Image (cartoon, rainbow, N blue to C red):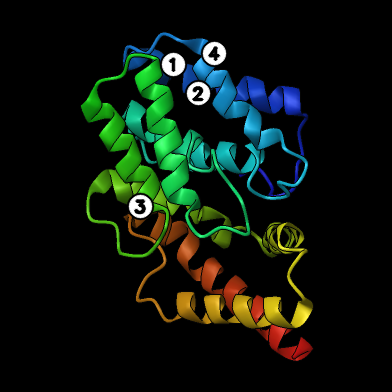
Amino acid sequence: MIPASRQISERACRGLLHERLWGAWLELGLKREDAFHELVSDYCAPERAYHNLDHILACLEVAEGLNHGDPRITIALALLDAVYDPTAKDNEHQSAKRAALAMRTAGAKETDCAAVERLIMATAHTAPPVQEDEKIVVDADLSILGADWETYSRYAAAIRQEYDWVPDDQFTAGRSALLKNMLARETLYWTAPCREKFEAQARENLRRELAQLEALG
């Protein structure tokens, strides 16, 4: 898994993402490469400490390990954070809309656009994923939670960096509530391979971060 902080160059990230995404783009009959590049470029914004190309590549790596074989999943994961504003509450909705617009511009079928929108919206994590492709996308998006503690710590620090405009006490309270909510879930992962590989470590990481936050409070 690619660490949360940028560990490879932007050029290498772009090359790897192009390798994975462009094949899926063509498999769905999409033609316009400029629309693809416009979407990818946003991931390189300096304020994206975590929601950057490394995160997308890590998600794609997990999904490929599940042998999904569906280009819609690849495109959804590649574009799930096409729009990311930590001050907003509708990033998934805006990302889904932007991805679908880019696909339509490139000549996609409406059924494919709708599928990608649905998959990106599943990463809002407001309801359990139902369809198998949704489970893959959701599990890939949350795979960072099951990384080793060092990698997870870099992820947590990157999230704090993205929310550096929030006062410490407010961030601690909000983040603690989020961690408690996740720990209360019956399961963090919906596919058997991810549950087996990540669940135990993810819960350990969440509990450990929560203890650190509570110690600060």
Mark 2 or 3: the one toward you? 3
Which of the marked residues, 3 or 1, is nearer the chain's N terminus?
Answer: 1
Tag 2–tag 4 contact (CB < 8 Å):
no
> Which secondary structure, mark 4?
helix
Q: Quadrant of residue 176?
A: bottom right
User: Alpha carbon of mark 2 to alpha carbon of mark 4: how far?
Assistant: 16 Å
> Which secondary structure, mark 1?
helix
Which of the marked residues, 4 or 3, is nearer the chain's N terminus?
Answer: 4
**Does 87 sit left or right of 129 as displayed?**
right
Q: Residues within 10 Å of mark 1 (few under 14, many from 20)?
A: some
Task: State the quadrant of the N terminus.
Answer: top right
Q: Identity of the amino acid at label 1? A: Gly
Which of the marked residues, 4 or 1, is nearer the chain's N terminus?
Answer: 1
Mark 2 or 4: the one toward you? 4
Q: Residue furthest top?
A: 31
**Does 176 sit left or right of 101 as displayed?**
right
Q: Residues within 10 Å of mark 4 (few under 14, many from 20)?
A: few
User: Alpha carbon of mark 4 to alpha carbon of mark 1: how far?
Assistant: 15 Å
Residue marked by disc 3: 122
Residue marked by disc 1: 23
Residue 197 circle label: none
**Residue 30: x, y in percent?**
37, 13
105, above or below 119, in the image = above
Residue marked by disc 4: 34
Mark 4 or 1: the one toward you? 4
User: Alpha carbon of mark 4 to alpha carbon of mark 3: how far?
Assistant: 27 Å
Residue marked by disc 2: 20
Which residue occupies 69% across, 60% down?
A: 159
